[in-house]
Structures are given as C-alpha cells and as structure tokens.
Image (cartoon, grey):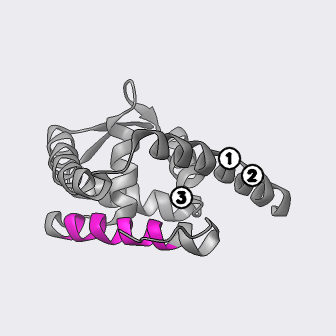
C-alpha cells in the first residue's frame, strides 16, 4: 500500500479504475466475453424481469457513456452466444447468461476481497461518497456538452 496519501484527482481515480478494470477484463477473457458484454449482461441479470431493448440500451449507454449503436451490437453478440434471449422487443437473460454472470461475479469477488482487504470501512464509505459526487458532476458536465 502507498505510504503517502496523494490527493484524489482525475489521474489517481483513472489509474484505480483501469487497474481494477484490467483485473476484470482478465477474468472476462477466460470466459470469452468483453467488458461491454459483461456490463450489458449484468444490466439484464439484475433487472426485475425482461427489459425492453430500448431500456436495456439506454441503461448501458448511460453507464458506459457509449453510443447506442455499439450497445445494440453488444446485445446482438450476447443473443448469438445464447446469454440473452429475445421475445419481440423484450430481452431476458438465459440460464447460460445467469451462470456466466455468477461465475464472473464469484471470481472477481475473490479478487476484490483481496484488493479491498485492510482498508477501513470508513475510508471506503468516504471514497464512495466522493466518487458518487464526482460521477454526478461529470454526468452534468457531459449533459451540458451534448448538442
């Protein structure tokens, strides 16, 4: 662990994000899925039921800040892999999709436990609050930039 505290800023937050994402992508590669596919699958798995394609696309574009067309390509790939199924405009997770999601969640959970081990809960709570504020402000700035 770093012995001297560095102020949080875009670079520090970005480095932490990319380090964690690299771990996740390593796990995902073993399962033959991409980061965007995992986020799309997670959105479908954690929904209360089938999602309208537009709702699913909107949720993923909002989370990842990517183009809707890219998410539709991702949904098509997940449908082709049998991880999602479509009934008209409604998208559902298949048993295979839920099993993959559970496997990836279990693997990354073990790694995350090691990454976060020893960090005081109050520090994690503070970091969570700060990152939520940063996300909210960045989303507002992004919305202001949109045409």
Q: CA distance from mark 1 to mark 2?
A: 6 Å
Query: Which x, y percent locates residue 19?
Result: 38, 71
Q: Residue at x 36, y 34 (%)?
A: 46
Q: Earlier in the sequence, mark 3 or mark 1?
A: 3
Which residue position holds label 2? Answer: 137
Whether pointer 1 and pointer 2 mark residues with C-beta atoms closer than 8 Å, the reply is: yes
Callout 2: SS: helix
Whether pointer 3 and pointer 1 mark residues with C-beta atoms closer than 8 Å, the reply is: no
Q: Does the magenta-highlighted stretch encompass residue 16?
A: yes
Query: Which x, y percent locates residue 40?
Result: 39, 51
Nearer to the camera, 64 or 12: 12
Task: Give the overall secondary structure of the magenta segment.
Answer: helix
Nearer to the camera, 75 or 143: 143
Relative placement, left or right, of 7 versus 27 is right
Nearer to the camera, 12 or 87: 12
Q: Residue at x 79, y 58 (%)?
A: 141
Q: Which mark is residue 64?
A: 3
Residue 8, compared with residue 126, is above or below; it is: below
Which residue is farthest front?
3
Residue 147, compared with residue 75, is above or below; it is: below
Instruction: Please say whether residue 147 is visible from this viewpoint.
Output: no
Q: Which mark is residue 133?
A: 1
Give the quadrant of residue 38: bottom left
Instruction: Please say whether residue 3 is visible from this viewpoint.
Output: yes
Query: Which x, y percent locates residue 32?
Result: 19, 67
Q: Which mark is residue 35?
A: none
Closest to the camera, between mark 3 and mark 2, is 2
Relative placement, left or right, of 109 versus 58 is left
Q: Residue at x 50, y 40 (%)?
A: 125
Question: Where's the C terminus, which quadrant?
Answer: bottom right
Q: Earlier in the sequence, mark 3 or mark 2?
A: 3
Tell me where the magenta segment starts and ends, as one range: 15-29
């Amino acid at each position: 662990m770093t012995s001297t505290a560095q102020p949080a800023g875009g670079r520090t937050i970005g480095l932490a994000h990319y380090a964690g994402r690299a771990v996740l992508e390593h796990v995902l590669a073993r399962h033959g899925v991409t980061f965007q596919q995992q986020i799309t699958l997670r959105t479908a798995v954690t929904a209360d039921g089938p999602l309208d394609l537009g709702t699913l696309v909107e949720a993923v574009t909002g989370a990842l800040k990517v183009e809707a067309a890219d998410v539709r390509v991702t949904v098509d790939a997940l449908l082709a892999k049998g991880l999602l199924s479509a009934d008209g405009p409604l998208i559902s997770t298949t048993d295979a999709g839920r099993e993959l999601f559970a496997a990836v969640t279990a693997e990354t959970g073990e790694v995350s436990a090691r990454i976060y081990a020893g960090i005081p809960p109050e520090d994690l709570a503070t970091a969570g609050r700060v990152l939520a504020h940063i996300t909210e402000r960045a989303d507002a700035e992004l919305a202001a930039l949109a045409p």
